[in-house]
């Protein structure tokens, strides 16, 4: 679940960053995908770490 939350939050963050920089629609899409993937992977790593330490 943390990975999914990271994916969504990363996508929102990426879209916000691209719009703030004045990017076109493709820039917004690219940054949304990039940040979404990065935050989703980070969330998956956190989930695996938490399972090993707490579980």
Image: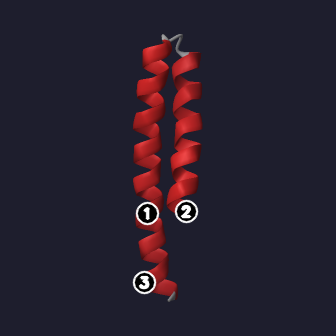
Rendered view: 49 above or below 40: below
Tell me which label, 1 or 3, sits earlier in the chain: 1
Tell me which label, 3 or 2, sits earlier in the chain: 2
Rendered view: 21 above or below 10: above
| Quadrant in which residue 37 is drawn | top left
**Closest to the observer: 1 or 54?**
1
Provide the residue designation for mark 1: 44
Q: Dot 2: what SS?
A: helix
**Tag 1–tag 2 contact (CB < 8 Å):** yes
Q: Dot 1: what SS?
A: helix
Residue drawn at 43 percent across, 16 percent down: 26
In the drawing, what numbered circle is on residue 21?
Answer: none
**Tag 3–tag 2 contact (CB < 8 Å):** no
Q: How is the image coloured?
A: secondary structure
Residue 49 pos. (x, y %): 43, 75
Provide the residue designation for mark 3: 52
Residue 5 pos. (x, y %): 58, 54
């Amino acid at each position: 679940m943390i990975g999914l939350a990271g994916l969504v939050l990363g996508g929102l963050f990426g879209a916000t960053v691209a719009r703030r920089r004045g990017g076109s629609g493709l820039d917004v899409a690219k940054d949304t995908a990039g940040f979404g993937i990065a935050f989703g992977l980070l969330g998956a790593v956190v989930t695996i770490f938490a399972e090993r330490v707490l579980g």
